[in-house]
Image (tube, helix red, strand yellow):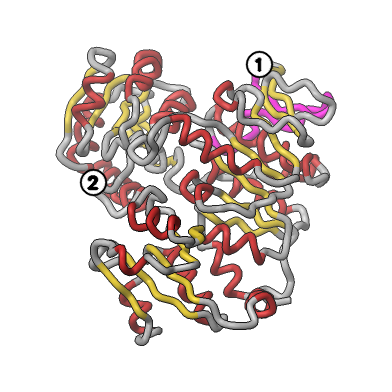
Amino acid sequence: MEALDLMNSRTTTAQFYMIVGLGKSGESCVRYLLESGQQVMAVDSRENPPALAALRRDYPQLDIRLGPFKDSDFVGQKEIIVSPGVAMSTPALRLAQQNGAECYGDIELFVRFANAPIIAITGSNGKSTVVTMLAEMFNATGKRAIAAGNIGKPVVDILREGDASPPDYYVLELSSFQLETTHSLDAAVSLILNISPDHMDRYDSYEAYRTAKASIYSGHGKIVVAVDEVELAGLLPADRDKINFGETAKGENDIRIANSDGDACIFYRKQKLLSQRGLKVPGRHNLVNAAAALAVAVAVDVPIEPMAKALKQFKGLAHRLQFIIECNHIRWYNDSKGTNVGATVAAVEGLDRKVVLIAGGEGKDADFTKLAPVLKSNGRALVLIGQDANKIEQAVSGVVKTVHAVDLDDAVAKAAKMAEDGDAIMLSPACASFDMFRNYEDRGEKFITAVKQYVN
């Protein structure tokens, strides 16, 4: 049954929905609901949100209200779909809930009508990589999978397309913001890759952030467990089927990481599946990501050998430890997707050479002191940009030579002067991009352009 027919079969009369936030996910929800015969109004605290022009062009009668939220718009609403960028602590949303409104996000709307098993993946770092790995692995081995969520197209666009032939799996990357507003998720497989402090500007505490991540375990499906991640302690349900992966994984069906012939390797039932040298993506963290993907394959009972073979062809994601060019014995990498401290630590550790790190931006109240040990062991120098450059410098004071740059062109030039033969220069900001750029993709593309202009 197509998605729109499915929705109409469950709602014989039109319902009224408020959409809060008109970015990609909000736009997709507006279109889906209107096309399925529902009544919609939309609000956004911005005067010119990204989807405004397109929605006004296609739906001139749509009620869109812009600017600071008004309590009067929210009181009396029954169904409110909230974009991930809008905190549930927003006073107008709290007021609406107190008056009986059900508030949820686009992922919740999707899972209510999804017509194939869901593999749900979250984590502070690595989730985009693992989701993409899994989709490519499934598709390369004859299973059809669609990657969506916090990556690629908004999930509700999949519902809009009304695919008459559903995939074998939906592989969803879910952020903590999306999980906050998802209440009906019952994934066939759930996985938290890791947890480290992030988005502390949005959460009251680290424990609140961990709790949001842990909600991915709601339901009855299997759980894939990163057994080496101590931060997951206390979050795991006791009564669920589990597949473990990591160095301390010991079960018969677990995916184990161990050294063999001088290289870190992945094993399943004493069979060596692949080695770190056998991957096209660098870094120990990517071997862990590969182990996570293979553990999911075990959980859904897909033959492991062809999945491992497909992994060897995985070339990585744009803006995630993306090799740009080598010039004068210096390698340049774009890791603009390193938007938190944990991601940057993993990226610097993942390169087998000294690193001149370019970092900085909107820090989200992160603890930058965790950069100090990896810079001491792997860093050559540090170039800082953006609004929280001074905070980072104070947090790692004296560890490596540190300079400030006014923009990426300046940062590239200064980094090149501090690098030595055989070093890597890498943009891995440990921060969000919104102080200087549209998003991390925009930041990464501008960095690539700056590098190529400099070396040429």
Q: As drawn, is 118 to the left or to the right of 281?
A: right
Q: Which residues are magenta?
A: 263-281
- Residue placed furthest toward the bottom: 61
Q: Is residue 56 above or below residue 452?
A: below
What residue is rendered at 51% in x and 52% in y?
181
Does residue 28 show up? Answer: yes
Is 430 inside the magenta-drawn segment? no
**Type of residue at label 2?**
Asp
Q: Position of residue 30 (x, y in %)?
A: 46, 73
Q: Position of residue 236 (x, y in %)?
A: 66, 31
Q: As drawn, is 224 to the left or to the right of 270?
A: left
Q: Position of residue 123 (x, y in %)?
A: 54, 38
Instruction: Identify the residue under disc 2.
Output: 435
Q: Is residue 297 above or below residue 172?
A: above
Q: As drawn, is 260 to the left or to the right of 288?
A: right
Q: Between residue 15 and residue 286, name the one nearer to us.
A: 15
Instruction: Identify the residue under disc 1.
Output: 262
